[in-house]
Amino acid sequence: MLVLYSVYATFFMTVFSYICGYITGHQFREPELLNQLVKTSALPLKPNKKNILGWMIHLGFGVIFGVILLLSWFYFNFSSIIGFSIIAGIIAGIIGVLGWQVMFKLNPRPPKIQLHKFYLQLVIAHIIFTFTFINFLG
């Protein structure tokens, strides 16, 4: 169930990113950005921006975050789903921002996007991920 909940939560956060990108006109679509990073890296893979590889990488990170959230939820024993979602979502968002920064810095030709806007929506997207994931736990 952990993998399924992680996939659902990743899907909901990604829908939020797609909607934010559509509304603002900025590139916030994580799977497409991941494909661009892979394509311009030293890896032998050259996916186009709509390739499923970006989704697979994104969902893989979602499962890792799901495991961490599950352990955190039981360890800290929060009584409030909303409080936990905000705190853990912000922390997860900061970790996500740091991860993206590393990927952008290591890539010889990173996508040219509005990083501060991308990172802001990314933190909010991780709050959505956390809230969705914890709600599926029941």
Image (tube, grey):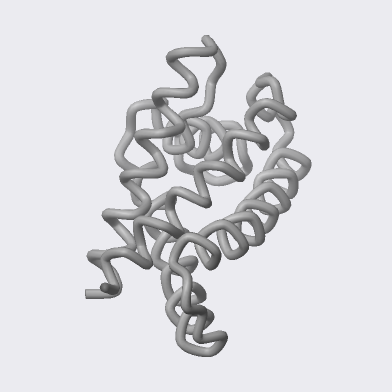
The C terminus lies in which quarter of the figure? bottom left
Please state the horizontal and vertical placement of residue 109, each as a whole percent of the image. Answer: 70, 27
Residue 77 lies left or right of residue 87; in this view the side is left
Q: Which residue occupies the extreme front position in the image?
A: 79
Please state the horizontal and vertical placement of residue 123, each as a whole percent of the image. Answer: 61, 45
Residue 10 lies left or right of residue 115; in this view the side is left
Please name whichever residue, 45 or 90, is drawn nearer the observer in this view of the structure. Answer: 90
Please state the horizontal and vertical placement of residue 14, each as a whole percent of the image. Answer: 39, 39
Please state the horizontal and vertical placement of residue 100, each as a whole percent of the image. Answer: 66, 45
Q: Is residue 24 above or below residue 131?
A: above
Residue 33 lies left or right of residue 90; in this view the side is left
Residue at (47% x, 78% y) in the render: 79
Residue at (62% x, 43% y) in the render: 42
Q: Is residue 10 above or below residue 107?
A: below
Residue at (69% x, 53% y) in the render: 94
Answer with the quarter of the image where residue 60 lies. Answer: bottom left
The N terminus lies in which quarter of the figure? bottom left
Q: Is residue 8 above or below residue 125?
A: below
Residue at (42% x, 57% y) in the render: 131
Please name whichever residue, 75 or 10, is drawn nearer the observer in this view of the structure. Answer: 75
